[in-house]
Image (tube, coloured by chain):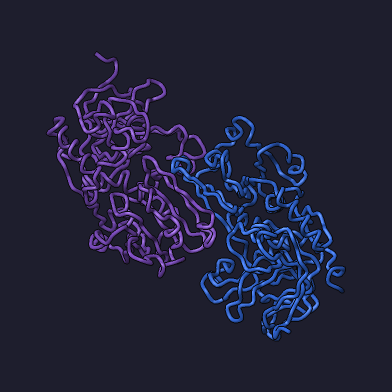
Chain colours: A blue, B purple
Amino acid sequence: MSKYDQYEGFQVESPETWTEFHKNKFDVKPFGDHDVEIKIECCGVCSSDIHTINGGWGEQKFPLAVGHEIVGKALRVGPKVTLVKEGERVGLGAQCWSCLECRQCKNDNETYCTQQVDTYGQAWPDTGIVTQGGYSSHVRAHEHWVFPIPDAIPSHLAAPMLCAGITSYSPLVRNGAGPGKKVGIVGLGGLGHFGVLFAKALGAETWVISRSHSKEADARKMGADGYLASQDPDWNKEHAMTFDLIISTANNFGEGFDLGAYLALLDVHGKWVSVGMPEEATLNIRPQDLNPNGCLIGSSHLGSRKEMLDMYKLAAEKGIKSWVETVPISAENLSATMKRLRKNDVRYRFTMTDYDRAFGA
Amino acid sequence: MSKYDQYEGFQVESPETWTEFHKNKFDVKPFGDHDVEIKIECCGVCSSDIHTINGGWGEQKFPLAVGHEIVGKALRVGPKVTLVKEGERVGLGAQCWSCLECRQCKNDNETYCTQQVDTYGQAWPDTGIVTQGGYSSHVRAHEHWVFPIPDAIPSHLAAPMLCAGITSYSPLVRNGAGPGKKVGIVGLGGLGHFGVLFAKALGAETWVISRSHSKEADARKMGADGYLASQDPDWNKEHAMTFDLIISTANNFGEGFDLGAYLALLDVHGKWVSVGMPEEATLNIRPQDLNPNGCLIGSSHLGSRKEMLDMYKLAAEKGIKSWVETVPISAENLSATMKRLRKNDVRYRFTMTDYDRAFGA
């Protein structure tokens, strides 16, 4: 009998068995004054889940329930909570706590707080209890990281915005995507499809850059103004030095990936912002690839609470609809879904649903 | 007998003999309506000269007179020239022509014009005549690239500002170096010493980051507020995530250069701007080096006419003095000077002088 409260969730036991899920009980941190307890309704499936449970991002703490695109109901709020009301429908993304006192936290850069805690797989400093993600019955998080969701957005479509959505949205707004700007989205997967939806909603001229033309029809349906296939000869020539911003969701910079050809698309001081997080891979950057346009290469990590709320507001107002395939949560279905995601066999995001059947109402 | 006008200069004949200079006559482009003819008084010595004549930057057109930090007198101006007066003391940097019609040219980004012509080693499209640099009696350039120099700045100190100076100044002002900002200058050579002088003059908190402490006293004399030696253990720890901008003048990113340790110094979305142009070398960037602070890596190429004039104004007003060793121009002295520069045996810039003795008054 644990001295801590317990929830129930689908956990993976080791990297070697990362496609096997087991329904276990686990300890959760003591409920804090600023905490919100969420009864989970659904959870989006993110590539981070795979990179974590298969060990691709390094050693992890097992057993572990992943999942960090969580939508549910605020079952209980701590006595000092002001940002969330009991009973509200809310979301929780990839992080669940930060110090809120450092320069980063005070500057809408709380996702870069050096003390921040991930929604799954990280030990709380006080108790050592490891955070467990959204393939579970409930989850606890600090109110700052819990976001009320507008009524206009169905839960299964709101869920993937909590990681994939904000990851694409934040670098767009931080780098001025809007009317008069030409934006490229490299890779049309879960992240990329949000890149297109949000870049268009923000008013930018939006281009998809993919390897082949296989996703062109989808890209157009999402609203893309143009499409470039990097396997076409001279694919980048006509557009040299015309893009203000490229958001790269690619997570394979290996052989055959000619970064210089992409950078040549950027206008002077244009930015290449990478939001894909490959398991390995190094960007081999030749100074002469940066010099002709003085371009910049960077990355971006999630987005602030403020941006999260703005993103949902924009999505509600503009009727932005994530392209989502729903899957009822179970050990078997999680296994099958992870395998499909590993093969990129999804257009464009999974959301695990039917939590009441798995965990009770 | 050439059908073109001719000047005289110290040329190198081949990469194999890059330390041998020969005083030759050479053809020059026909004098255009917007051209300025400069009688050269002195010329700064830039590492680009070496990278060009030794073949490090690839195949070049020989015989070639290099030198692109040119100060002299506007001997003659074309009938349409409005920016320069006959008799004025003027400077010419690393570029001598651009189209002035493209988006880059119209946007104070003329150094990124895809048609721009370098001051030495490039064939004019119309005649095929190869541009020859400042180790010569005279030079011709379009008025846009010819800059009046304030009386307060002696010629031999003004010269190195035309390439090294503007290369350091432009990324500082373009990236907001000023009061309240913390700026790092990596490498204290010709470029780096200007980085310190200008960052200070612009009001930024200025730190030098060098391998050892050997240049610390000089850095302090130049006005640096702080100094970090990357060979010290944990040298970057105390300053993690505190720099807004780092200008890297390093031109060796080979073994032992831990880029991640430098990037860790940057605040969220801080920028690493590289202005060193190594002969080879690739920046091996791991995505996880960019992710903790969402930093950006870029480069910068010279600076606009507007920035050049602003830089001289600032230098005149603040009494900024380049640290310069003067050397009377001759074939022997050019050879010795290039050899010393190759060994970084200079604190911090050479200017070739006494042109009247070499070429006549």
- Percent position of residue A185, x then y: 64, 47
- In front here: B285 or B156? B285
Q: Residue furthest top?
A: B1
Identify the residue at horizontal 37%, vertical 21% (top origin).
Answer: B128
Instruction: Determine the residue positioned at 14% across, 32% down.
Output: B358
> Which residue appears at 53% of the width and 47% of the height?
A270
Q: Percent x, y for residue B230?
A: 34, 60
Left or right: where A116 falls relative to A80: left
Quarter where residue B328 is shown:
top left
User: Which quadrant does the N terminus of chain B fall into?
Assistant: top left
**Is A135 placed left or right of B2 in the picture?**
right
Please identify the residue farthest to the front as the structure is shown.
A16
Query: Looking at the image, can residue A212 be seen?
Result: yes
Report the side of B283 relative to A348 (left or right).
left
Q: Nearer the viewer, residue B38 or A200?
A: A200
Residue drawn at (70%, 60%), measured in percent from left and top?
Answer: A17
Vertical position of residue A249 compared to residue A312: above or below: above
Residue B131 rendering spot, x and y as whole percentages: 32, 28
Quadrant of res A58? bottom right
| Above or below, B139 relative to B237 | above
**Where residue A110 sits: x, y (%)?**
58, 69
**Is residue B155 in view?**
no
Q: Quadrant of the C terminus of chain B?
A: top left
Count the numbered circles shown.
0
Q: Quadrant of residue B179?
A: bottom left
User: Who is closer to the viewer here, B88 or A31?
Assistant: A31
